[in-house]
Amino acid sequence: MFGLTEAQISEFGLTWGLGLLIAYMLFIVWDLAKKSDAGKLGTFVLFFVLAFGMLGFIAKSTIKWLLGI
């Protein structure tokens, strides 16, 4: 399809699809903090705890890019 292999299409979908999902989840966390009047510390805790799992995906992608894998 369009001169791309299945592996290239899968990698593109995984990277951009999960990236967009992560951005949406960060918006949800921000909205949750805003609606609950969490304050600065509460907002930080929400982002740290709820977004900690996303950090692993971002780190993996960055390490793969740096190593050229």
Image: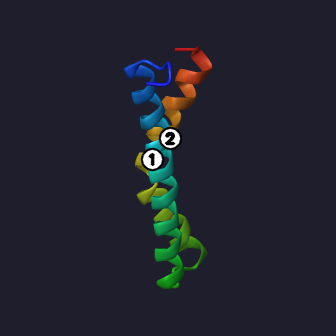
User: Residue at 44% of width from left, 44% of height from top?
Assistant: 18
> Quadrant of residue 41 in the image?
bottom right
* Secondary structure under the numbered disc 1 in the rendered image: helix
What colour scheme was applied to this rendering of the protein?
A: rainbow
Foreground: disc 1 or disc 2: 2
Residue position for label 1: 54
Residue type, label 1: Met
Residue position for label 2: 16
Which mark identifies residue 68? Answer: none
User: Residue at 50% of width from left, 18% of height from top?
Assistant: 3
Residue type, label 2: Trp
> Quadrant of residue 63 in the image?
top right
Query: Label 1 crowding class (10 Å Cα cut-off): few <14, some 14-19, many 20+?
Result: some
**Front position in the image: 60 or 1:** 1
Q: Is residue 6 left or right of residue 41?
A: left
Report how many numbered discs are placed on residues in the image.
2
Contact, mark 1 vs mark 2 (Cβ under 8 Å) = no
User: Residue at 48% of width from left, 32% of height from top?
Assistant: 12
Query: Label 2 crowding class (10 Å Cα cut-off): few <14, some 14-19, many 20+?
Result: few
Query: Looking at the picture, does residue 61 appear above or below residue 26?
Result: above
Query: Looking at the picture, does residue 57 appear above or below residue 2?
Result: below
Q: Is residue 7 left or right of residue 45?
A: left
Q: Specify which label sits upstream in the sequence, 1 or 2.
A: 2
Residue 44's x, y, as percent? Answer: 55, 65
Gap between marks 1 and 2, in whole Å? 14 Å
* Secondary structure under the numbered disc 2 in the rendered image: helix
Residue 55's x, y, as percent? Answer: 49, 44
Residue 11's x, y, as percent? Answer: 44, 28
Quarter of the image with the N terminus in it: top left
